Amino acid sequence: MSHFHAPGTPVAVLTTQPLDRALDYRAPAGGIEDGAYVEVPLGPRKVLGVVWGKAAGDWPVEKLRPILRILPVPPMSDAFRDFTERAAAYTLTSLSAMLRLGLRAPGLGEAPGKRRVYALGTGEPDRATEARTRVIAALRERPGDVFALSELADMASVSTGVVKGLVKSGAVLEQDTPRDADYPTLDPDRAGKALAEDQMVAASALRASVRSDTYGTTLLKGVTGSGKTEVYLEAVAEALAGGLQALVLLPEIALTGEFLHRVEARFGARPAEWHSGVTQAERRRCWSKVATGQARLVVGARSSLFLPFQNLGLIVVDEEHDTSYKQEDGVLYSARDMAVLRASCEAAQVVLATATPSLESWANAELGKYKRLDLTSRFGEAVLPKLSTIDMRDEKVPGGRWISPTLKQAIEARIIAGEQSLIFLNRRGYAPVTLCRACGQQVACHQCDARMVEHRFQKRLMCHQCGETAPMPPACPSCGVEGKLAAVGPGVERMAEEVATLFPEARVAILSSDLFGSARSLKAKVEEIAQGGADIIVGTQLVAKGHNFPKLTLVGVIDADLGLQGSDLRAAERTFQLMRQVSGRAGRADKPGVALLQTYQPEHPVIRAILSGDEEAFLREEADQRRAAGVPPYGRMAGIVISDPDGAVAFDVGNALARNTQPLDQVGAEVFGPAPAPIARIRGRHRVRLLVKAPRQAPIQPALAEWVARITLPRSTRLSIDIDPQSFL
């Protein structure tokens, strides 16, 4: 419970600085309450913090420095403080690093009017230069937005002096930060789309959950195009009608454009946005309006979970299975799991919406921890596409080429019909798996259950789970055929070249998140393709996520095998999800779609499950295998990555940890490794991995903390612990 601290009394303030504890300060005149956002002196600097309770009391009050000022926003709620502490304990993150996630709006500590912002003016520059042209082009791309000086300079890749020079001619306007305007009112009573019977049943169940004012999680499962969005927007309407705030998480910024149109159609106005595609001024506005409760609905990326909601009633995690909900640097957390934790602290409801549930969510629904609602009918006229495989062992594909004659023929037919084709590469997030092109088998590790990965420059195969290595065999260990072992999967650029050679007249668009500098340019490209601006789309995982391309009737998956039985425990599940998701892109309008999967293993259980569409059977089979192996969700896992400029130093630290496992032994945990990480070197730092596996009920976090605390890291070495790792790279 919050506590009021009288003037001059000692209080504990948790700052955003990398310290291991809260610091003691003196309460200001007028007193202060727990949760107040404050500015305090720390050495010669002023830093932001939050009043975290009573002081430790190990300093005399008269020696304590006073709190400088209280920020003019409501205090952090008890529920949010509780969430911050529990999230830090779960992810083995310092409290200050967790608080930093909740204070990421720029300019919070500055008084209004202190900040200058820049916008598009009406004048013309007195002299046109390439740098000046870039600034004006950046502003024209986003005409209604205002930018901080450094932000605009970074966007246009110019110095701040170039921006300042344009102010004199009036081509750029300089002004004090405009006072944050309120967000428009959303109308929950406005009529939504007409719902089918199964959608109405699901919508009324979600509305009842929101009305209950208690914590609960619901898995909302429905095939692509079954109207999941319309259904969970009814739950949002219930939250808004009850005076509560709602948060909708989306996995990719590129999805927000289309989604915002749907929100506007349903509620008559646009909600608040929070992601890397909005300006600093807009982020500050969103943060402060969420804190006062005026922003009632936020649509955002995973970091919006750490906004200062006052009365949060609903969190929707759209495409809940998506791997991009896992933060892979800095604080390592899963937004899906943290959404459930935050809702339990706030007594709010969670909706996990997906066409292909993660095994974790499916298992929680099977155990009765989550409720489950299924949508069965596809929305409007769309029908599910026809799925079939192309057996690559029978196709004549020249070396260095990837598109089979069968797939080429199918694409040509679509071009003649004026329809779109998607060439999908299942490549991001996987190490290069070595596969036999004669029999389709991958080379397995003799020491553990993972697959071997080719390190071409060493001419060796390596297991990234246990560290075992072997020379590259001349013949396939399974079928004995020589010269047929090959790493699976080309890159996007290589694929685009092949497409241009095979279809010289076709308009080709590439959709890969690596190739777009800004969220806006990616959104614009998606809209252009949706309106028919390409004949062939070459894309990666990005395409599998929620985009609607009405003219798309053919999906060709180049490397369906990439990810099957990989060194990643979720490889089969991810392959299944991706193939189902990406094939669901085809035939969303009145034309039926076809999905063709190029595979060397058409008899593989995952490929067969994809074709049959029997998802429940696949998940049950996958669950049985995971249960037998004692891995998530039927066991606990943690990934430890050690990095150092010197590879030998990183391995020494890994070996020291592997030799001294007593705290882990006591909770029944096993340690694998050290082994080189699949991506063995990043920015000049060598990376070494260890994997910890423990029984489901084991108190793994305290054991890990004690284990790691026993060694002293060299100054140059970094160590990170990832609870429930999603990526094994």
Image (cartoon, helix red, strand yellow):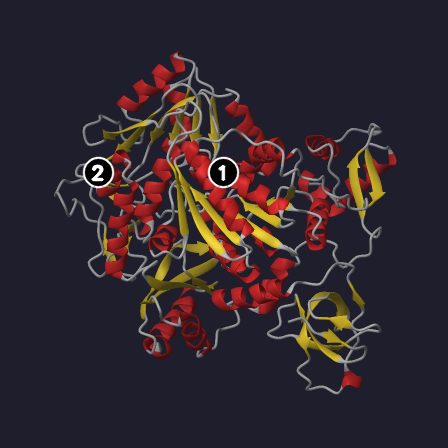
Residue located 34% across and 75% down the image: 667
Q: In which quadrant of the rendered image does the C terminus lie?
A: bottom left
Question: Could you tell me which secondary element the residue under label 2 belongs to?
Answer: loop
Q: In which quadrant of the rendered image does the N terminus lie?
A: bottom right
Residue 624 vs residue 232, the one in the foreground: 232
Q: The disc labelled 2 sits on which kind of residue?
A: Gln
Would you name the residue on which mark 1 appears?
A: 231
In-image side of 89 versus 555 (left or right): right
Would you name the residue on which mark 2 appears?
A: 601
The residue furthest top is: 416
In terms of sequence position, does the residue under pointer 2 or pointer 1 come before the other?
A: 1
Residue 93 vs residue 205, the one in the foreground: 205
Query: Image quarter for residue 594?
Result: top left
Residue 501 on image: x %, y %: 39, 21
Residue 573 vs 44, above or below: the answer is: above
Residue 592 on image: x %, y %: 36, 21
The residues tagged by marks 2 and 1 sit, at their Cα atoms, a distance apart of: 38 Å
* Mark 2 burial class by Cα count in 10 Å: few <14, some 14-19, many 20+: many
Is residue 426 visible in the rendered structure shown here? Answer: no
* Mark 1 burial class by Cα count in 10 Å: few <14, some 14-19, many 20+: many
Q: In the rendered structure, are the residues bearing label 2 and label 1 in contact, judged by CB atoms less than 8 Å apart?
A: no
Residue located 75% across and 46% down the image: 148
